[in-house]
Structure formats: C-alpha cells, structure tokens
Amino acid sequence: MVMNTTRSDERICVMHAERADVAAVRAALDDARPVLILGGPTGELAEFCGVGREAALPDTEWFVTLADRDEAARLDTEVPVRGALDLLRVGDAATVAATTSVRFSHTPTIAVREIDGVRLVVVGLHDADVLWSHPTLGRYVDRLLHARHDMRATPYGVAVVGYGPFGGMGYLHGLACTETDGLRLAAAVDTSPDRLAAAQGDFDDLTVYGDVDYVLADDDVEVVIIATPPVLHADLARKCLDAGRHVIVEKPMCLHVADADDLIARAAAADRVLSVHQSRRWDTDYLALQRLVAGGHLGEVFNIETFVGGFDHPCRAWHSEESVSGGAVYDWGSHHIDWICQLYGAAPARVSCVTHTRVWHDTTNVDQLGVHMVWADGREATFRQSDLAGIRRPKFHVQGTEATVEGHYRPLSADRMEPGRGYLRGEHHHAEAPVELEMARYESGYGLVRSTLPPAPHPGWGFHRNLADHLLMGEDLAVRPEQSRDVVAVLEAAHMSGADGGRTVEL
C-alpha cells in the first residue's frame, strides 16, 4: 500500500511495513522514487530491504541517537520521541542510521539502503505524523531519503557589515558563526577603527575593513550580514546582491515595500539567498505559544494582542531617531508583527495605528503606539509599544474558540556582591526573559481548566543553523524574504497611519 504522505516531496513513497510488499517497493525504486517504510519489515520484504524487525517496543518515550553521518549535520544527536517503535536487524546491504537505547544497549531503529542511486529508508516508528512533525527526526529522515552527494565540505565565509559595539549584533553573529558548523566568520566592516580593533580581539583570524566595497572584493566572503541602522539596509543589500553575495539583513529588511520587492527580485535574478534575521522566532516563549496554536489547543485563534514597553525615558541612540530607524514601530514591531503574521499564516488586509507624543520630547520617536490589524476573514491583532506604561500589559494575550493564553513580563535583575563594592544590582531589559504562559480552556459542563506552560527548550542558534542547512543542503529557509516583505508592508502602513491620525490603510 503506497501513501503519498510526505514532508517535502510528493514523489516519496511512504509505506507501512505490515501492508507493504516487495513489488510495490521495487516499482517505486525503479521509478527513481525514494521509499520510506514505517515499522520493521518481516519475511520477503525484510530480505529485499536488508532490514528486518528485531523486536517491538510499546508506545512510550524513547531516545533515538543519530549515527555519525553527513545528514546529521547541525541536528541534535540524541532526541526523545513518543510512540510505538520497532527495533531493527540490519544486514550487510544496509547501514545503520540511528539507534535506540533499551536497558543500556543500543539497537538500530533507522536504517538506509541505496539501490541504483535511490534511497530506501526503514524507520522503526509506526506513525508518519509523529515522524514528520518531529523537529529532528523528520528532518533527518527527509535528508536520508534525498541523498545529496554534492555537499561541500568547507564552511561559508561570512562578513558582518556594521559590527557595532561589544555585545551588539556583530558580536552575536560572530558567536553564531563560530558555533554553527558550516559557517565561518571571515570579516567585519565598520566605520569605527575602535570597533574594528575590538572585533579582531573578539574573534581570531578575522579580516576587518572600513568600507563595504573592500569586503565585496574579498573572495573569502560569500555571505554578508547587514547589521547597520535600518535606513541603510536597502542600499547595502542591493550592493551586496549585485556583487554576487548571499545577503542576510537585520530586522527590519528595509523601510519601504518598494525596496523589499526590489531586493527580492534582485536576489532571484542573481540566484542568491536573501533572508532577514528574525531572531525572535526562536524565543522560547514564542515557540511555546506557536506550539499551542499549531497543535489546535486554543481552537481557532481569532484575536492576538502583544505588548512591549514600560514607563521610562527612551534611549537616546539611533533607535529613537526616526530618520535613522524609520520610526518607533520599526523597532520592536519588526519582531511582534512577524510573530503575529506567523501565527496567523498571512499578512493582514487592513492596518491602522494610533500614536501619542505626550511626555518625551527630546527624541523623534512617538511615546506610544498601537497597531491594529484586521484579516479578510475578520480575525484581528493588536501590537502596542509604549514608553508611558507604568503597569505593563501582558506580553501575549491570545484568544481562540476553545481557550485563551496569556503571558506576563517579570522583573529581570541580577543581585551580586563584589569585594570592596558590596551589594550591586543589575537591571536588564524586561523583554529579554521568556515568560510563562497561562492557558484557560473551557470544558463543557465543567468550566474553565487552567494550566501553566513553561517556555520551550532553547533551540540554540536556530536562524544560523537554518542558514547553513539551506546553503549546504538545500533545505527551506526558515525566514523567507516574502514573509519579511509582508512585515515591512505592515510596518510602513502603520507608520503612515500613525502620522495621519490613525486612518485605515488597505494592504
């Protein structure tokens, strides 16, 4: 029995071992279609596959350890999975791709065989949905099925344009490249000699330049990360794309939709990667919220509200200068509106924004803004940012037809004692700490049932790992430029609306 249940390629044949037969497997392979068999084969099928069922394990949590293969690059090497699982017996014609530890003994649970250049993969799991939805095993099996023999072994050289101060985005990208297999920080660009000297102290074997033209003449640089203030993003991205470089832009991609469309067209024409560092898609509280929404735990989501801010004097750096940043909404709004669009799966149809400038008059940013978005089917969302909020709103307030979830900020400080100085207390930005989510779910005849959900496990350098996976293995970009273009469209519409008394802008 052949099912076209697949993760990324409709030509994959997915078969259950109990119902598959040799003729069907052979026919698929002859047609150059990779075959995935779920569960351990027996009898004639086991002989053909070179893989058979050794033992059946009950439905519970098991730990699967990936083999040391190219397909395991940048994946967690040992991961838990819940489900019924078969242990496998692997003959000489096949190779072990993963094992499962049972009572301190590792036994094969994923095996692969290549027949005339086409892959046959046997996975001990019985449930295709469990496999494909697993963040590690689904990707690993997908890679096993799509054998790539042209994977380059050398990492991609990366340059950061706009290295910035210590602890800023240049340092962050440098750490990520240093700790992500497949990427290498090769160069940094900044107009400040002091910052370039600091960059060389931060990272070994780093070439520094005072102008982007010099880095574009460096053949070691294949990927350029633009980490300058937003007003410079579009022109720098154009220059780098036209020079044949893959380009990553810090959020927001740019300030205007017309520039976003132009950049996307240039990247496509040059066959170069264009993406935006939407780093907060990997925030652990957002990942927990995304899991709730995607899993249907809230029912149909119809209202999303997010907030960031407090009551404090705004920073006096370029973030608060509209001519450099684009305006207040382009700052945290780049993250929050991206979250909202991802949770809904599309950009809104209409945008309006109300702003206030009532207390802080030494910056060009507004003191407070509220962006209201409406989708064609009536769903709505609101993003609020404020420097006038003495009591903070919830970070997340999400309503669905079956449940509501909310997450509140908490103070973030670090107490310490230092010899000669005594007690010291360090305050940190409230938005840097992930929040716990409280969910209230309605049960008919009973009432509201409340539960608390912690943040998801930390995913590490999720954006940079995906970039390496895309460049080296052809996997899908996590942040497609069209998605960031939609975010820019909302930001630009909100900025226009706020400047025009809150009028509604159609997208």
Image (cartoon, grey):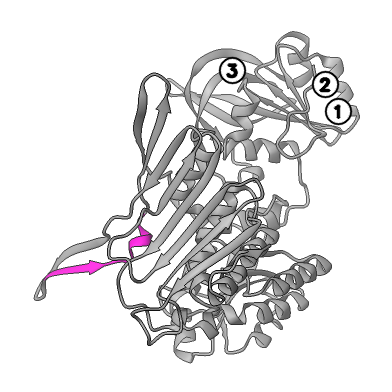
**Which residue type does callout 2 highlight?**
Val
Q: What is the crowding at mark 2: few (fewer than 14 residues within 10 Å), some, or many (at least 20)?
A: many
Q: Quadrant of residue 362?
A: bottom left
Q: CA distance from mark 3 to mark 1?
A: 23 Å
Q: Which residue is mark 1?
A: 29
Q: Is residue 286 left or right of residue 15?
A: left
Q: Is residue 270 left or right of residue 53?
A: right
**Residue sitting at x 76%, y 66%:** 272
Query: Mark 1: which secondary structure?
Result: helix
Mark before the other along the chain sequence, 3 or 2: 2
The magenta region covers 423-433
Q: Which residue is mark 3?
A: 86
Q: Are marks 2 and 1 in contact (CB under 8 Å)?
A: yes
Q: CA distance from mark 3 to mark 2?
A: 20 Å
Residue 490 can be seen, yes or no = yes
Find residue 494 and report its horizontal and vertical position in percent. 57, 68
Q: Which residue is mark 2?
A: 25
Q: Residue furthest top?
A: 43
Reply yes or no: does residue 430 show up in magenta. yes
Q: Is 457 located above or below residue 230 in the figure? A: above
Q: Nearer the viewer, residue 284 or 399?
A: 399
**Which residue type does callout 3 highlight?**
Asp
Find residue 386 and report its horizontal and vertical position in percent. 39, 68
Q: Nearer the viewer, residue 38 or 501?
A: 501
Find residue 311 and report its horizontal and vertical position in percent. 30, 70
**Residue sitting at x 48%, y 91%:** 193
**Which residue type does callout 1 highlight?**
Leu
Q: Is 331 located above or below residue 83 in the figure? A: below
**Residue sitting at x 50%, y 38%:** 400
**Residue sitting at x 50%, y 17%:** 59
Find residue 418 and report its horizontal and vertical position in percent. 13, 70
